[in-house]
Amino acid sequence: IFAGEADFMWAANSLKNLPPQSKVEIAFAGRSNVGKSSLVNALTGRNTLARTSHTPGRTQQLNFFDIGGHFHLVDMPGYGYAAVEKEKVQAWTKLIHDYLRGRASLARVYVLIDSRHGIKPVDAAVLDGLDTAAVSYQIVLTKADELKKGEIEKCIADTAQKIAKRPAAFPEIMPTSSRSGDGIPELRANIARLLHE
Ligand code: GDP
């Protein structure tokens, strides 16, 4: 699935300019600095995607990538970045909310959580939104290389407990590290299974 091309396809900063729902969409969300660009790059084996997303002006929109013609990867704007003015936060919260609510082609949102920090209130607010919109999501822990094995196991257990009663959460939690490559094949396989369901 990830062997082919990964092309920047579309950027949307309003509901009016979302691309047609021609393929299954899989979205990635997380706090700014959680390691989303690095993870997307590690998954796709390309650096171009992150560069696109970090281009000023493109950071606050939904970026769509065509992955080998198999599915569309949606890079969602990072949240919880304190320096962004309130107005902008509201505009982009609304975009995300509207997108999540009305998108039939969206199969799953992978919500990235820094394994050193676990689920923070700002993450919990995003999970609340996903639960309310009944959008299926799954937690991916990032930067697992920063922790010892026992600490990762603890983070997985704590996180599992925090999402246990959340209606739209997929129970399996995936530890990953873009730096070491740990968990990347598992995440790829997870996505592949999702596409074949
Ligand atoms: P984004 O803002 O969520 O797109 O995050 P980036 O991918 O740009 O990464 C933010 C910071 O975290 C950078 O300094 C990266 O080098 C670092 N980072 C990203 N992935 C990893 C990882 O797997 N392990 C470690 N230790 N650091 C990482």
Image (cartoon, rainbow, N blue to C red):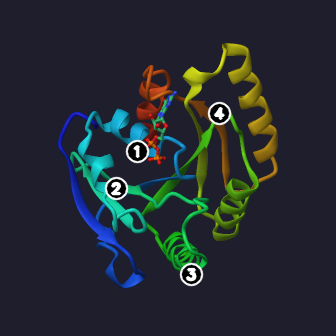
Residue 94: name its quadrant. Answer: bottom right
Circle 3 is placed at which residue position?
A: 87
The residue at 58%/25% (across/down) is: 144
In this picture, residue 136 sits left or right of residue 15: right
What is the three-letter code of the residue carrying label 4?
Ser
Which label's residue is closer to the chain start, 3 or 4?
A: 3
Q: Is residue 176 left or right of residue 71?
A: right
User: Residue tagged by mark 4?
Assistant: 115
Task: State whether label 2 is within 8 Å of ligand 1.
Answer: yes
Mark 2 residue element? helix
Residue positioned 43% across, 31% down in the render: 189
* Label 1 SS: helix
Amino acid on which disc 2 is placed: Ser
> Which numbered circle lies on residue 53?
2
Q: Amino acid at mark 1?
A: Ser
Inspect the image, locate mark 3, and give the three-letter code of the amino acid beneath it: Glu
Which mark sits nearer the N-terminus, 2 or 3? 2
Give how far across and how far down residue 150 sits, in percent: 73, 15
Distance from disc 2 to disc 1, alpha carbons, whole Å, reads 8 Å
